[in-house]
Amino acid sequence: MILVSRTDFPQMDGRTRISHGGILMLLAALALLLFLTASIVLDAGSISIASAGVITTFILNGTLAIVLLSKSIAERPFSLVQLHWLFYITMFVVAPLSQYLYGYSAWGHPLGDSDYLGTNVLLMIWGVFFAFASNSAGFHRPSRSGSNNVKSQSAFYESLPSISARAALIAFGVSLCSAIIVIVLVGFSNLFSRGDFVTGLDKTLGLLFDKGVRPLPVFAFVLIFARAKQQHKFTLLPIAAFLIAFIADFPAAMARYNMACLYGGIILLVLGPLFEKRGLFPALFLIAFLVLFPAGNAYRWESFEISMLFDAIRNAALNLPQGFCAVDYDAYSMVARTSQYIATFGVENGYQLLGALLFFVPRAIWPTKPEGSGNLVCAAQGQLQLNISSPLPAEGLVNFGVFGLIAFAILLGILCRKGDAWFVRSCSPLRLLYPFLCFLLFFGGFGSLCDKGLA
C-alpha cells in the first residue's frame, strides 16, 4: 500500500470559545461592514422615506448573518458554514445595499422597492432555514466526543495516513506530465493570461483542461507538501512541485473563481495560523475578496503585466463602496429577477435541476436539455447577455418556488454541517480536498448549477 498507518485526530473539549485574537478579528470585520455601509450611505446622498423599509430589511439580514458568522468563527477557524455566511454578507447584504443606494441596476434591469423588500424576505427565509439545518442540534443529537475543532496544522497532517516517498514521486510525475501536456497544446507564452489561454484552445479542449488537467499539479503539490509536513523536513521536491503548479495554473490565466478555489485551498493548507487563529481566515478572506477579486478581472482579456496588477489593486481599494456597482455582484439581483420570472411564468417543476443532475447526457441525445437558470430568466426578460449566474436561492425558486428555496437551504445546511464534521473527525486523506471545497462552496454559490460543473 502506498498509504499506510494513521494516528487519531485530536479532539477538543465540549465548549466552544473564541480567542481574544478572534474577537479582535471579528470586531475588525464588523467595523469593515459598518464602514462600508456608512460610506455607501454618506456618498449616495439623501435616502427617500420609501426606502426606509428596504434598508431595515437589509440591516435585519446583515444582523442575522453577522451573528451566525460569529458563531461559526467561535466553533472553528474555517468551515463550510463560515464560507456560506461570508457569501451571504457580501453578496446578499453589502453589495445589493450599495447598488440600491447608488441607484445601480445590474445588467440594466431595474428593481423597485417592492422587489427589494420581497427579495430580502426570501433571503431571510433562506438564512433562517440554513441556520437551523447547519446547527448540529437542529437535525441530530450532538456528538459525545466534544466540539469539532482543528487543534493545529501539525495535528491535522499527523492525523492523515502516512504518505510514502513513492506516492510523492508518483504525484510529482503526474504533475510534470500534466504541465507538459498543457504547454504543448497551449504554448508556453499563452499560459500567463486568461485571454491568451482561452484563445489557444477550442471550447471543448478549454473545458477539459480547465476542469480536468490543470488542477492536477495543484493537487500533486498538496500531497507532496503533506508528506513533507509529516516528515518534518522539506526538500526541493515540494518547491519544484509548487513551481510546476504555479506555471500550469498561473493565477492571471484562470477564471477568477477557479483561481480562488485552487490557490485559496493551497493557502489554507500551507499557512499554519489559519488552522489555529479563529477569526483570522474570515478577515483575510474579506480583504482578498473585496480587493483582489475585482482586481483579477483586469487580466480577463489582457496579457499579464505586474504594473497592471498594482493599478487594479489600488483602484479596487480606493473605490471600494462604488466597486459593488458592477455585474460581478449580480447574485442578489438574480434572486430578485428569478422571483419576477416565476411570478410571470411559474416554476419549472424541477426541470432545471434535472438538467443539472443529467449533465452527462449530450445535447445530441437530449436536444431540449435546459440551459443555465440565469440564461432562462434573462432570456425571458429580453436581455441579450445570457451567460449570467443564478445563485442557489434562485435555483431553488426557479425549480419549485418558495418551497424549493427552503428545501435547497435545508439541504445545503445539512451538507455543510456533515462536511465540517467529517473534516475534523475522519482520518481519510481526502480531507486534503476540504479547503478547496470551502472555496468552491463560496464561488459555486454564484451559480448556476448548470454552469458550475454540474452540466
Image (cartoon, rainbow, N blue to C red):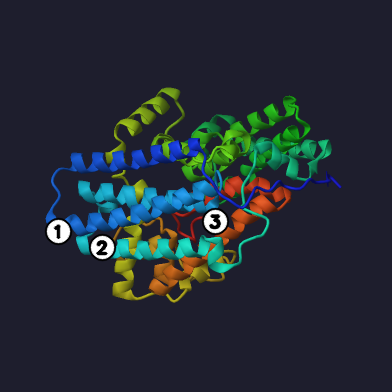
Disc nearest the viewer among 1 and 3: 1
Q: Are marks 3 and 2 in contact (CB under 8 Å)?
A: no
399, 188: nearer the viewer: 399
**Residues at marks 1 and 3 touching, judged by CB atoms closer than 8 Å:** no
Per the model, the C-alpha gap separating discs 3 and 2 is 32 Å
Marks 2 & 1, CB-CB < 8 Å contact: no
Task: Name the amino acid, label 3.
Answer: Gly
353 lies above or below 185: below
Report if residue 300 is visible in the image: no
Is label 1 in a helix, a strand or a loop? helix
Task: Tell me which numbered mark, 2 or 1, is placed earlier along the sequence.
Answer: 1
Task: Return the residue at label 3.
Answer: 453
The mark that comes first in sequence, 1 or 3, is 1
Amino acid at the residue labelled 2 = Leu
> Which residue does the numbered mark 1 point to in the structure image?
50
Helix, strand or loop for disc 2: helix
**Image location (x, y in percent) of residue 356:** 52, 65
Residue 57 % position (x, y) = 28, 58
Q: Look at the picture and state if 415 lies above or below 231.
A: below
The residue that mark 2 highlights is 117
